[in-house]
Image (cartoon, rainbow, N blue to C red):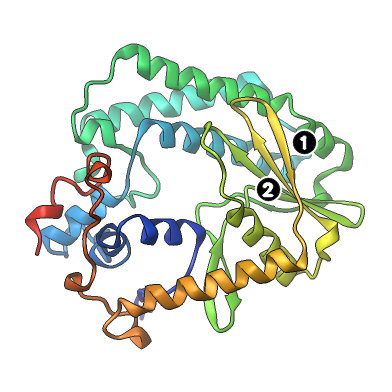
Amino acid sequence: MRKEFKNEFSWSFSRDNLFNECKRKYYYNYYGSWEGWKKDSIDEVTRTLYVLKNLVNRKIWKGDAVHKEISRVLKSFETTGMIGSYEASVKRTTQIMREEFKFSKEKKYWSTDKSLRKVNALFEHEYEMDVSDQEWIDNYNEVIKCLKNFHNSEIVDELKNIGTDSIITIDSITPTPFDFNGEIIYVNLDLAYRVDDEVKIVDWKTGSAQSNTLQFVVYVFHTNETLGTPLNKLTVIEYNLQDNKQYIHKFNEKEILEAKEYIDSSMSKMKSYLYDPLNNSADISEFPRTEDDWKCAYCNFKKICFDLP
């Protein structure tokens, strides 16, 4: 008999961001939408929340397209020892984005039997936003620019020189869990590899938004805990593919301790909203909507949120 998939409590950088943004949105994402992937065996509200949860705007879609292609190239390199060409990346990504755009525009995400983690449902299509053809073209062109900068990057050159045995991990659809004081933390490293006795963690960025270093501290904390790599031998490379710039991050024991304290506090706050923390059980009435009305205009759940209790 197949083991039932249980909604277990966990912590991640993105989950913490959502919790701080809006408690109700947090509830919809992690509780209200649970089991919404069972299209033919779930109630309408749960299914709706699940679909809306998986909407992404065109900027996130851009980043997703870039990350997936980089992951394909690096996983192929890990197997074959060869980095595919930039031209092959452009051809493959262009075809995929065209198919995804058509799928989304026709709103097929409402009827698909596939997990929505494997397809793209665009916020702009669901809410029928007025986006010009040129804006879509600009978004695509930024994808191609990011891929070109990836293929021409020093990191790709270094990987070619040091070989496939240096690779520790490559971005995956499923985040990696690790234990923190008996709780689960999820991380998803875009790339980690060894150079002699050092470990480099690469985080590909495709936008202009300022990064939150907590994300990078968690990467270092995770790698230090799971691989035993000393902190002074761990480097995070924040690679902005849009601007073709690298930012180097290193962290000390004090910063790691502060991050652990923050995570512990964040977990406690999240659990304080649960009526049964032991079983990770939540009730919608305990999760208030944000009072920042401007956030609602860009929220995935705006079409249903105020119809619910």
Residue 227 visible, this orientation: yes
Q: Which circle marks residue 23 in the picture?
A: none
**Picture residue at 38% right of the left edge, 59% below the top:** 20
Under mark 1, the amino acid is Ile
Q: Give neighbour class at mark 1: few <14, some 14-19, many 20+ (Cα, 10 Å).
A: some
The quadrant in which the N terminus is found is bottom left
Picture coordinates of residue 54, whole percent (x, y): 32, 48
Q: Give neighbour class at mark 2: few <14, some 14-19, many 20+ (Cα, 10 Å).
A: many
* Number of numbered discs visible in the structure rendering: 2
Q: In the rendered image, which quarter is residue 271 located in?
A: bottom left
Residue at disc 1, secondary structure = helix
In the image, 38 versus 56, the foreground residue is 56
Q: Are marks 1 and 2 in contact (CB under 8 Å)?
A: yes
Q: Please report whichever mark, 1 or 2, sits nearer to the chain's N-terminal start.
A: 1
* Up/down of 20 relative to 201, above or below: below
**Picture residue at 40% right of the left edge, 46% below the top:** 118
Q: In the rendered image, which quarter is residue 132 located in?
A: top left
In the image, 135 versus 110, the foreground residue is 135
- Which residue lies under the disc numbered 2? 191
**Picture residue at 22% right of the left edge, 21% below the top:** 130
Residue 2 visible, this orientation: no
In the image, 105 versus 126, the foreground residue is 126
Q: Which circle marks residue 155 in the picture?
A: 1
Under mark 2, the amino acid is Leu
The quadrant in which the C terminus is found is bottom left
Residue at disc 2, secondary structure = strand
Q: Is residue 207 left or right of residue 61?
A: right
* Up/down of 217 relative to 239, above or below: below
Picture coordinates of residue 127, whole percent (x, y): 19, 34
Picture coordinates of residue 159, whole percent (x, y): 81, 39
**Picture residue at 55% right of the left edge, 84% below the top:** 182
Question: How far apart are the two marked residues, 1 and 2, measured between alpha carbons?
Answer: 10 Å
